[in-house]
Image (cartoon, rainbow, N blue to C red):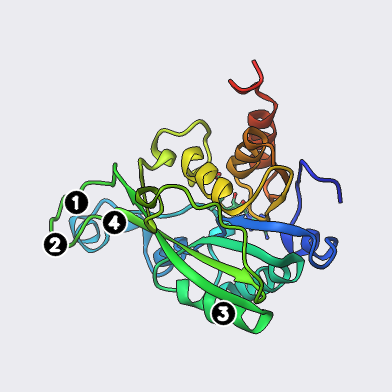
Amino acid sequence: METNKIYCMDCLEGLKQLPDESVDLVLTDPPYNISKLNDNRDKSKLNSPIMRRESPLIYDFGDWDNKTREEFLEFTQLWLSECCRVLKDGGTIISFFNKEDISFLGWTSKEFGIRTRTILSWHKTNPVPSFRKVNYLSACEFLWVGSKGDKSWTFNFKQQKEMHNFFETPNKSYYGETKHPTEKPLSLIKELIEIHSNPQDIVLDPFMGSGTTAVACKQLNRKFIGFEISKEYCDIANKRLAQKTIFEL
Ligand SMILES: C[S@@+](CC[C@H](N)C(=O)[O-])C[C@H]1O[C@@H](n2cnc3c(N)ncnc32)[C@H](O)[C@@H]1O
């Protein structure tokens, strides 16, 4: 498969076409399956005060985020095992994931030769306000970081103060560049790519969405391979990629 392309296809099909040990970094943001939280919900009652009190937020990102729990875990295991297979020895795998299931990535990938290195926290400085004031604001997301094999991994350490396992930046999906509901901040993705890869390395993102990983690779002189199942999101990502960046002007 050619690099620097986003393939508009199911990643489970696309990943099979990649050779073993052919990518340096997997950086991805898969479905969290949190739309399923609405499963038992009678949406016709959404305007009733009772329904509002019980569940004030609707998360419905689309069919791609709406599997049964069994389907979701099986799907996660399938893409994760393929990503581990195509990762080079010494390569890094990083995935955003929902806070309830993030340990699933660590213990599932262990059998594919992956060692969990850390969990990163991303503090979103613009969380949805709490109107009921009965719990903390949902202001953090988490990323699991692992590396393959026993040899040392690519880790471009910056200054001590920049290497805390914590990032702070606003959530782009409220006002991002695109209409994708879960667009991630370009600055955060770029920082991870700089730390975990070198120029000309190959970065794989099987769930490209609006193409944030691809844009970051283009700006940082890394090669990328991406998959995205939705034609609409592929079009958004390719349009973003075609735009000239300030580095090219
Ligand atoms: C959480 S979003 C990624 C958002 C991305 N990080 C961004 O900044 O725009 C997950 C994406 O995975 C895509 N997706 C879901 N199932 C897929 C599959 N089997 N193969 C490829 N893409 C898939 C969805 O269409 C969605 O755009």
Q: CA distance from mark 4 to mark 3?
A: 26 Å
Quadrant of residue 40 within the rendered picture: bottom left
Q: CA distance from mark 1 to mark 3?
A: 31 Å
Q: Which residue is mark 3?
A: 70
Residue at 13% in and 62% down: 134
Query: Which is closer to the viewer, label 4 or label 3?
Result: 4
* Local SS, label 3: helix
Q: CA distance from mark 2 to mark 1?
A: 8 Å
* Local SS, label 1: loop
How many marks do you count on the picture? 4
Residue 134 circle label: 2
User: What residue type is disc 3 on?
Assistant: Glu
Disc 2 vs disc 1: Cβ atoms closer than 8 Å?
yes
The image shows residue 54, relative to residue 196, as above or below, that is below
Residue 138 circle label: 4
Task: Work out whether residue 225 or residue 199 is closer to the camera in this orientation and state it.
Answer: 199
Q: Which residue is mark 1?
A: 130
Q: Residue furthest left?
A: 133
The image shows residue 30, relative to residue 193, as above or below, that is below
Q: Earlier in the sequence, mark 1 or mark 4?
A: 1
Whether residue 69 is visible, yes or no, is no
